[in-house]
Image (spheres, rainbow, N blue to C red):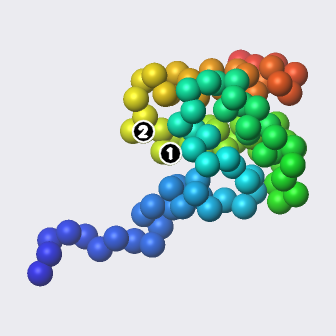
């Protein structure tokens, strides 16, 4: 008999959302790319082309990026985290959005 607690069905929900979300059709490996502008352009294209999103394109793209940083990003190395943070700025530029303070 194992002392490990039983895994709940919701334990890995964030990884499942990142892989299987139908709100945006993400390019494979987009969050591993090293060019923040390329990441932002890909997210923008996915959000602009999505017919399943419930929010405006900018919000959908930014939400997916922030979701990844907050959930899956715990294990990111500092360099990749910096790239993804820069991608947030690139998204704002691409959509002509101002940063909220």
In the picture shown, does residue 1 fall above or below 44? Answer: below
Please give left or right for residue 91 compared with residue 81 in the image.
right
Q: Which residue is mark 2?
A: 74
Please give left or right for residue 24 compared with residue 85 in the image.
right
Q: Residue at x 34, y 70 (%)?
A: 7
Q: Quadrant of the N terminus?
A: bottom left
Real-space CA distance between mark 2 and mark 1, rounded to the nearest whole angstrom: 6 Å
Residue 41 picture location, percent across and down: 76, 32
Quick one: 33 or 2, which is closer to the camera?
33
Image quarter of residue 69? top right
- Give the class, few, some or many, for how many residues have Cα within 10 Å of label 2's Cα (few <14, many ≥20): few
Residue 40 picture location, percent across and down: 72, 31
| Residue 32 at least partly seen | yes
Q: Residue at x 50, y 27 (%)?
A: 81
In the picture shown, does residue 20 fall above or below 35? Answer: below
User: Outermost residue, left direction?
Assistant: 1
- Give the class, few, some or many, for how many residues have Cα within 10 Å of label 1's Cα (few <14, many ≥20): few
Image quarter of residue 42? top right
Quick one: 53 or 30, which is closer to the camera?
30
Q: Residue at x 57, y 38 (%)?
A: 31
Q: Which residue is mark 1?
A: 71
Q: Quadrant of the C terminus?
A: top right
Q: Residue at x 80, y 20 (%)?
A: 93
| Residue 59 at least partly seen | no
Circles 2, 1 touching at the beta carbon (< 8 Å): yes
Identify the secondary structure beneath mark 2: helix
Identify the secondary structure beneath mark 1: loop
Residue 70 picture location, percent across and down: 52, 39
Residue 67 picture location, percent across and down: 60, 43
In the picture shown, does residue 33 fall above or below 86? Answer: below
């Amino acid at each position: 008999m194992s002392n490990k607690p039983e895994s709940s069905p919701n334990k890995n929900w964030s990884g499942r959302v990142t892989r299987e979300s139908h709100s945006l059709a993400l390019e494979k490996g987009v969050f591993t790319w090293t060019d923040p502008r390329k990441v932002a352009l890909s997210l923008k294209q996915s959000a602009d082309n999505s017919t399943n999103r419930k929010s405006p394109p900018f919000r959908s793209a930014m939400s997916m990026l922030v979701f990844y940083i907050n959930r899956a990003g715990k294990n990111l190395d500092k360099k990749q985290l910096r790239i993804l943070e820069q991608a947030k700025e690139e998204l704002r530029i691409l959509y002509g959005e101002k940063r909220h303070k």
